[in-house]
Image (cartoon, rainbow, N blue to C red):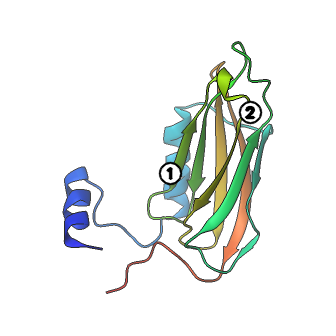
């Protein structure tokens, strides 16, 4: 980690970072995201390879079953990777004009872990899907 990045993270109150979060830290990130509500399983499909050779660039796709009308649409999709130093790795916002509630992204995974996709809908409800992946060469580690 560069000195300037380290100072920025200290200023933000996030340093020093551990190489990997604990499952408890991942669950805490989910709890913070859900604001005391429970996420219902279903409606969210997370496609991520079950075996990843290199965690530096992992392709994932998230789809949410939603009509995307003004009355019933996805507001946001959040992705939480339990084993990353900072578990909340992605947030994408949507409107009814988005047409579909889906995204494809490349993410870094620090280790083998469970990855969660949480959809926040316009009615205030949360829906979830998850996938487990085995990473043979981890990312998000700092070499000294």
Image vertical order of residue 66 relative to residue 136, above or below? above
Quadrant, the N terminus: bottom left
Image vertical order of residue 135 relative to residue 61, above or below? below
Q: Nearer the viewer, residue 36 or 66?
A: 66
Q: Comparing marks 2 and 1, which lies closer to the viewer?
A: 2
Residue at (62% x, 24% y) in the render: 95
Residue at the extreme top:
71
The disc label shown at residue 100, or none:
2
Q: Position of residue 56 (x, y in %)?
A: 55, 73
Q: Position of residue 22 (x, y in %)?
A: 51, 65
Quadrant, the C terminus: bottom left
Residue at the extreme bottom:
144
- Give neighbour class at mark 2: few <14, some 14-19, many 20+ (Cα, 10 Å): some
Give the Cα separation between the discs numbered 2 and 1: 23 Å
Figure label count = 2
**Which residue is under mark 1?**
88
């Amino acid at each position: 980690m560069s000195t300037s990045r380290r100072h920025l993270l200290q200023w933000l109150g996030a340093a020093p970072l551990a190489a990997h979060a604990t499952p408890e830290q991942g669950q805490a990130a989910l709890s913070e995201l859900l604001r005391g509500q429970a996420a219902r399983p279903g409606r969210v499909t997370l496609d991520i390879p079950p075996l990843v050779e290199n965690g530096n660039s992992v392709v994932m796709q998230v789809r949410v079953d939603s009509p995307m009308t003004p009355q019933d649409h996805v507001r946001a999709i959040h992705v939480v990777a339990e084993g990353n130093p900072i578990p909340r790795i992605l947030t994408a916002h949507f409107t009814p004009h988005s047409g579909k509630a889906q995204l494809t992204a490349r993410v870094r995974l620090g280790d083998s872990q469970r990855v969660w996709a949480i959809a926040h809908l316009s009615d205030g409800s949360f829906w979830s899907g998850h996938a487990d992946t085995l990473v043979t060469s981890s990312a998000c580690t700092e070499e000294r």
